[in-house]
Amino acid sequence: MKNIFYCILTILLGTTVLSSCELHTSNNGDLDNWWWLQQVDSLENDESVNYHDQKIFWSFIADLMETSGPSVKVSAKSSSRTFIYRFNNTDGKLIVSQPYVSARDIGDIPITKDSVVAVQGLASHGINFDPETVTDTFYIETLNSDEMVLKDKKIRLHFISY
């Protein structure tokens, strides 16, 4: 009798725990990954620059994007290597917006159009924000589990999966 009671109790507790969990899924497919920037092509002068040694990484999950790489000056007194963004992945376009300086110890700091130093500095991470809207729109040229190629108005970015 005791064993039946424990079995029923275990099933009830297991069902309660599982029903209280909310699963978040994304429709990003191969985009949800860690990406290592390998090359940047200028669309203005057809020059290509090898970025392999710069160690610039982009990662995506759900609707959050993170870039990490060289330190970027975000104010007169501070700099950061990591930034967080929102993104929208629709119809072959990747729209990056709402940038934040990742400062987990004090809380992430929003980057606004008034944060000129930070907006310009993010170009070293491959982001060319429009200074008024603080967005960058990329067109997805290639995306699979091994490779991603994105193009905005100024540059083409070549990534490999990391």
Image: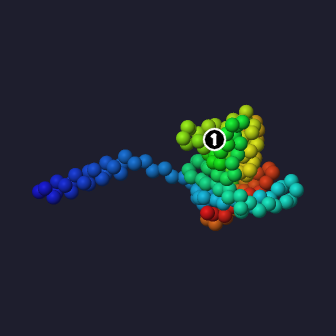
For the question of whether residue 90 can be seen, the reply is no
The residue at the far right in this view is 45
Residues 76 and 138: in front is 76
The residue wearing badge 1 is 100
**Which residue is located at x 63 percent, y 48 percent?**
82
Q: Where is residue 42 in the image (x, y as percent from the top left)?
A: 82, 56
Is 55 situated above or below 109? Answer: below
- Where's the N terminus, which quadrant? bottom left
Q: Please give the name of the residue rendered at 79% of the width and 60% of the height, measured from the top-left corner.
A: 49
Picture residue at 35% right of the left edge, 51% below the top: 18
Q: In which quarter of the image is residue 162?
A: bottom right
Q: Please identify the quarter of the rendering in which residue 46 is found.
A: bottom right
Vertically, is 12 above or below 113? below
Q: What residue is at 45 percent from the left and 50 percent from the top?
A: 23
Observer able to see residue 131: yes
Q: Position of residue 152 (x, y in %)?
A: 76, 51
Residue type indicated by callout 1: Tyr
Locate residue 112, reporting x and y percent. Answer: 69, 35
Q: How many marks?
A: 1
**At numbered mark 1, what does the secondary structure look like: helix, strand or loop?**
strand
Residue that extends furthest to the left in the rendered view of this protein: 1
Residue reaching furthest bottom? 146
Give the crowd class for mark 1: few <14, some 14-19, many >=20 residues within 10 Å.
some
Tell whether 25 sits left or right of 41: left
Residue 83 position within the rendered picture, expressed as x and y whole percent measured from the top left: 64, 46
